Image: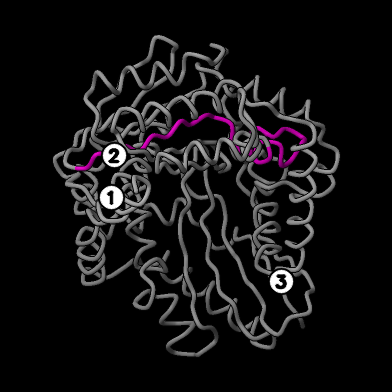
């Protein structure tokens, strides 16, 4: 009966009055950064422990960060994977791990009723500080990973993404896919995972985000408890700067499909980039606003060359990609790519109209609060703010920053940062 009740609680109370929340920040005695938001009314908390341990830290062992993260809950302390899953499930908690190119994280959502909360935290603490990295479990995980990487070769969209990042980043740590490649993953031993864990899963390289119905004192105790078992360690060296391309390029990968996947772009912006807001708002008009964007209008509405066409910036620690994309019939690929590039070139040269800018601002700010109206979403934003060291009032001032953007700022930022002649274009499909 308890589990059914807990499940109902988690399903019903998914939203919280975040708007009164304030992000607080401090450093733990172990040297980790902690970000905390108290929300009231729901007996639950979302916790995320994040490390600078994403795939950019793979070195030459592409995929090592991802498989290390995936192995954390395969066994820890005195429990195997089934027992860990049972411990979370029996108290209605939800646990997951993940990696991006910049970071690796462990996420926990649990109720705050003390016996349930204590069991969730004890389990997470063991996963953090005492993962087993059992040889047999690793071999099973490795086999499944290799099967997934083999299956990936059957996806033209995945192949396009891999080739696109390689075209943009060459030998930079952002270039390879997060999950790695068969050639490197096949060579992993379980000791490689242990070494990666010992190097990067340390207190000096950790950040804790706590969002929910806990007092600040409880949050402090929770963070210290979670971090207590970690080695202090040290932060890794910063990820290298990006080398921008000095000329455009086009690469085609033959694939037996009737549709061709197209990606085109270049390294774009950092999370802390001074041009972020003009580029963000400008891209919303260019290709980020779906059915009313310029790319959609030119490619889809006027010419019917694709079901959709889009663009976006993916800001990261270093310059994440600016990406334009579409899928089109193989015999229309050349025309679709030309229209996409011309639309970008015209927009960079002329910028948006005042009317387009006003509409974009209204669209962005109108739904902004809805992006983080749950504890989980707010925790994700707090994690982003903390990891990239953005101002603590970032969410509060975001609409003001958007409203302050002008047409001239958009044109200036685009013309300095998005040069159409440097586009790296990848197509995957049949001829």
In the picture shown, does residue 141 fall above or below 414? Answer: above
Q: Residues within 10 Å of mark 3 (few under 14, many from 20)?
A: many
Left or right, 289 with respect to 56, comes to left
Numbered range of the magenta stretch? 42-67
Q: Say which element carries label 1.
A: helix
- Residue linked to disc 3: 428
Q: Position of residue 46 (x, y in %)?
A: 35, 38
Give the alpha-carbon distance from disc 3 to disc 2, as whole Å. Answer: 46 Å
Residue contact between numbered discs 1 and 2, judged by CB atoms under 8 Å: yes
The image's colour scheme reads: one colour
Looking at the picture, tell me which residue is in the foreground, 174 or 167: 174
- The first of marks 3 and 2 along the sequence is 2
Which quarter of the figure is the C terminus placed in?
bottom right
Give the alpha-carbon distance from disc 1 to disc 2, as whole Å. Answer: 9 Å
Q: Which mark is residue 9?
A: 1
Q: Residue at x 36, y 16 (%)?
A: 27
Corner quadrant of residue 33: top left
Q: Position of residue 154 (x, y in %)?
A: 75, 68
Residue contact between numbered discs 1 and 3, judged by CB atoms under 8 Å: no
- Residue linked to disc 2: 44
Q: Residue at x 49, y 75 (%)?
A: 309
Q: Position of residue 358 (x, y in %)?
A: 20, 66
Q: Say which element carries label 2.
A: strand
**271 inside magenta stretch:** no
- The first of marks 1 and 3 along the sequence is 1
Left or right, 230 with respect to 174, comes to left
Corner quadrant of residue 190: top right
Q: For the residues carrying marks 1 and 3, which lies nearer the camera in this image?
A: 1
Q: Residue at x 41, y 82 (%)?
A: 297
In the picture shown, does residue 313 fall above or below 110? Answer: below
């Amino acid at each position: 009966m308890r589990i059914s009740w807990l499940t109902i609680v988690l399903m019903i109370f998914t939203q919280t009055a975040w708007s009164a929340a304030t992000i607080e920040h401090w450093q733990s005695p172990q040297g980790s950064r902690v970000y905390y938001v108290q929300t009231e009314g729901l007996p639950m908390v979302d916790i995320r422990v994040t490390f600078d341990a994403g795939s950019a830290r793979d070195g030459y062992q592409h995929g090592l960060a991802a498989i290390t993260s995936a192995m954390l809950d395969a066994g820890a302390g005195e429990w195997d994977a089934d027992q860990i899953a049972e411990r979370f499930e029996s108290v209605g908690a939800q646990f997951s791990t993940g990696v991006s190119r910049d970071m690796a994280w462990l996420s926990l959502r649990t109720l705050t009723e003390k016996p349930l909360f204590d069991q969730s935290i004890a389990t997470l603490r063991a996963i953090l500080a005492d993962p087993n990295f059992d040889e047999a479990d690793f071999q099973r995980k490795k086999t499944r990973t290799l099967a997934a990487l083999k299956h990936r070769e059957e996806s033209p969209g995945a192949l396009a993404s891999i080739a696109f990042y390689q075209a943009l980043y060459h030998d930079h740590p952002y270039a390879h896919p997060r999950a790695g490649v068969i050639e490197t993953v096949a060579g992993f031993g379980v000791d490689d995972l242990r070494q990666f864990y010992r190097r990067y899963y340390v207190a000096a390289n950790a950040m804790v985000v706590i969002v929910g119905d806990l007092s600040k004192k409880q949050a402090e105790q929770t963070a210290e408890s979670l971090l207590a078992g970690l080695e202090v360690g040290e932060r890794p060296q910063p990820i290298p700067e990006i080398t921008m391309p000095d000329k455009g390029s086009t690469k085609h990968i033959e694939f037996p499909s009737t549709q061709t996947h197209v990606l085109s772009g270049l390294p774009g912006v950092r999370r802390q980039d001074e041009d972020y807001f003009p580029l963000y708002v400008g891209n919303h008009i260019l290709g980020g606003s779906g059915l009313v964007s310029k790319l959609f209008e030119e490619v889809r509405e006027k010419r019917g060359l694709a079901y959709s066409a889009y663009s976006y910036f993916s800001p990261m620690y270093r310059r994440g990609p600016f990406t334009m994309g579409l899928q089109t019939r193989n015999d229309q690929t050349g025309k679709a790519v030309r229209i996409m590039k011309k639309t970008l070139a015209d927009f960079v040269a002329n910028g948006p109209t005042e009317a387009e800018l006003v509409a974009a601002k209204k669209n962005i700010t109108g739904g902004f609060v809805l992006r983080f109206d749950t504890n989980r979403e707010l925790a994700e934003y707090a994690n982003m703010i903390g990891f990239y060291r953005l101002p603590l009032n970032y969410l509060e001032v975001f609409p003001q920053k958007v409203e302050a953007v002008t047409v001239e700022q958009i044109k200036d930022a685009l013309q300095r940062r998005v040069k159409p002649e440097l586009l790296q274009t990848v197509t995957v499909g049949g001829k």
